Image: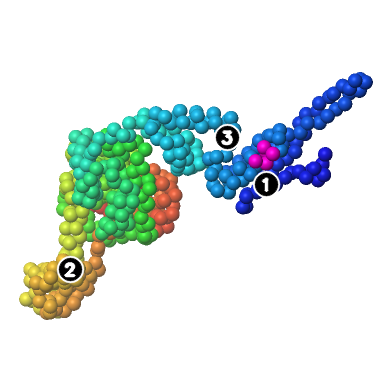
């Protein structure tokens, strides 16, 4: 019988809900008549079908009236939102019973457990997750993250410095730890585990230093977090500084010394300072590497310097040749053992050297100008005294502009001497060629002149402990071969 002729499916509805009743042929009965004829008689059932809560529900009835009553009741439940009144399948019932039994030890309702598991699943990446929530929790329990000791950051910083000092860490690195971690102690007097990447990022942004110094501070803090993980004070998967972005450093041109400039520093330096300057200029070691260097690593007879792995920035041992002119500078100063640099603060020594060189150049210009003026009263002592007064006036003016002092202690009419400009006692200006110190210029100069001399970038890269790409990009063709000949021809005056 077709649906059209029978009037099926019948639709029962309340409001916007519709439930359908289908007439389904499910069995055929055979009956044998008295005359032996076999006659078939079909039998039908009535299937109620509807969707609710994103599922299809179906139920069979032998009686049409019962099916209609069930359909009307179901439509009313759906329309009123009483989905709990809808029928459960046997599978649904078994699933509910099993789930309730599983969460029973937690004492939590089943719906809360389901929501929390779904939240964990989504946090791990959902369908793209490589681990399950259960695996993450088991790993968490296995590593005992809930048992981390409550260590304050200031204590951890002091312990790192103490243990590094006991372990024989060189003084230069201990100084770096103090410079970058002592301010961190003042900023974070709190438990280690409470510090976030966002707080570290904000701390670094507010430092009143350049991008390079901020990146140096970032790297040192990263080493500090690594130390804390080794001590068991932070979890092994602590992100450290991974989520702290580096600061963009401005691109600067490579600065080098001219042969005239480096000669001024070498000839006017204190005796103890000459090895530092000469090794930097004619062997290209980094300043920190020279400060860590011992005289037993300077092989003057065999003409090479050994930079040991633990003292090199790249943590790789390298051999640097000693040029003839470097050998001449070290000849009367080399020792069998001991630190090549006897100073704790090389930068302070460089500052004093820069002042000495500038004063010497200014005095040479003043003497020449005084002789030309023909004033016999302007003796060297008088010229030097007035030059220093003018220099003091300049420093006082700078301090006033920078807000380091509230008033000037020098009369305003006093001329201000600065590098390249000084004054005779009658305030006549005298110009001269200045010779300022250039940061990292000793190493930059060596690499530049060495490349020009040997025309072999890979060779120089091995000597300098740098990448060939970096040298090719920044140092090639800065100077010519004739300049290199002059540079490596600078020797002490006999």
Please give the residue where the numbered disc 1 appears in the rendered image: 12
The one nearer the camera, 193 or 488, is 193
Mark 2, other Cα within 10 Å: few <14 / some 14–19 / many ≥20: few
Q: Position of residue 250 (x, y in %)?
A: 36, 60
Disc sitting over residue 88 in the figure? 3
Q: Earlier in the sequence, mark 3 or mark 2?
A: 3
Q: For this view, does 256 lie left or right of residue 296?
A: right
Position of 70 compared to 107: left or right? right
Name of the residue lying farthest toward the right: 35
Residue 73 visible from this viewpoint = yes
The residue lying toward the viewer, choosing from 372 and 425, is 425
Query: Tell me, what colour scheme is on the image?
Result: rainbow
Residue name at image x 49 percent, y 37 percent: 130
Q: CA distance from mark 1 to mark 3?
A: 21 Å
Is residue 326 at least partly visible in the picture? no
In the image, residue 302 lies at what x, y percent? 29, 37
Q: Residue at x 83, y 29 (%)?
A: 41
Q: Which numbered circle lies on residue 403?
A: 2
Q: Is residue 67 magenta?
A: yes
Q: Position of residue 317 (x, y in %)?
A: 34, 37
Q: Residues within 10 Å of mark 1 (few under 14, many from 20)?
A: some
The structure residue drawn at horizontal position 59% and vertical position 33%, both measured from the top left corner, is 89
Q: CA distance from mark 3 to mark 2?
A: 81 Å
Task: Compare residues 365 and 416 and report the one nearer the observer.
Answer: 416
Could you tell me residue 441's position as x and y percent? Answer: 30, 56
What is the span of residues highlighted in magenta in the rendered image?
65-69
Q: Please identify, in this view, whether the residue under mark 3 or under mark 2 is nearer the observer.
A: 3
Q: Earlier in the sequence, mark 1 or mark 2?
A: 1
Q: Are marks 3 and 2 in contact (CB under 8 Å)?
A: no
As helix, strand or loop, the secondary structure at mark 2 comes to: loop
């Amino acid at each position: 019988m077709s649906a059209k002729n029978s009037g099926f499916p019948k639709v029962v509805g309340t409001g916007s809900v519709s439930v359908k009743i289908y007439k389904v042929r499910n069995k055929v009965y055979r009956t044998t008549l008295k005359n032996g004829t076999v006659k078939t008689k079909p039998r039908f059932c009535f299937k109620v079908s509807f969707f609710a809560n994103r599922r299809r529900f179906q139920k069979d009835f032998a009686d049409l009236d019962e099916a209609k009553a069930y359909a009307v009741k179901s439509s009313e439940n759906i329309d009123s939102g009483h989905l709990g009144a809808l029928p459960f399948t046997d599978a649904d019932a078994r699933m509910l019973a099993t789930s309730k039994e599983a969460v029973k030890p937690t004492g939590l309702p089943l719906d809360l457990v389901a929501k929390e598991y779904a939240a964990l699943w989504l946090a791990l990446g959902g369908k793209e997750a490589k681990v399950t929530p259960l695996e993450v929790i088991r790993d968490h329990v296995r590593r005992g993250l809930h048992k981390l000791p409550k260590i304050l950051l200031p204590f951890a910083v002091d312990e790192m410095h103490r243990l590094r000092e006991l372990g024989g860490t060189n003084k230069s690195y201990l100084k770096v730890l103090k410079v970058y971690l002592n301010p961190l102690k003042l900023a974070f007097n709190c438990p280690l585990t409470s510090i976030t990447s966002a707080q570290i990022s904000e701390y670094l942004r507010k430092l009143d230093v350049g991008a390079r110094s901020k990146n140096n501070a970032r790297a040192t803090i990263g080493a500090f977090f690594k130390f804390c993980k080794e001590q068991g004070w932070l979890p092994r998967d602590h992100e450290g500084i991974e989520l702290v972005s580096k600061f963009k450093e401005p691109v600067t041109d490579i600065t080098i010394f001219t042969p005239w400039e480096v000669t001024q520093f070498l000839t006017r330096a204190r005796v103890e300072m000459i090895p530092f300057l000469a090794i930097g200029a004619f062997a290209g070691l980094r300043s920190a590497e020279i400060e860590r260097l011992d005289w037993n690593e300077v092989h003057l007879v065999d003409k090479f310097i050994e930079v040991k792995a633990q003292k090199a920035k790249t943590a790789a041992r390298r051999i640097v040749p000693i040029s003839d002119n470097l050998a001449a500078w070290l000849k009367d100063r080399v020792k069998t053992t001991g630190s090549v640099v006897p100073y704790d603060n090389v930068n302070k020594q460089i500052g004093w050297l820069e002042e000495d060189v500038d004063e010497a150049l200014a005095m040479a210009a003043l003497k020449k100008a005084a002789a030309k003026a023909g004033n016999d009263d302007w003796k060297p002592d008088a010229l030097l005294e007035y030059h220093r007064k003018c220099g003091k006036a300049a420093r006082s003016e700078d301090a006033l502009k920078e807000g380091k002092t509230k008033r000037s202690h020098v009369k305003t009419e006093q001329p201000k001497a600065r590098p390249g400009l000084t004054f005779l006692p009658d305030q006549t200006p005298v110009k001269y060629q200045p010779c300022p110190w250039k940061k990292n210029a000793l190493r930059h100069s060596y690499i530049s002149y060495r490349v020009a001399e040997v025309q072999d970038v890979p060779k120089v890269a091995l000597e300098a402990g740098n990448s060939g790409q970096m040298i090719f990009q920044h140092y090639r063709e800065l100077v010519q071969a004739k300049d290199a000949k002059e540079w490596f021809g600078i020797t002490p005056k006999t």
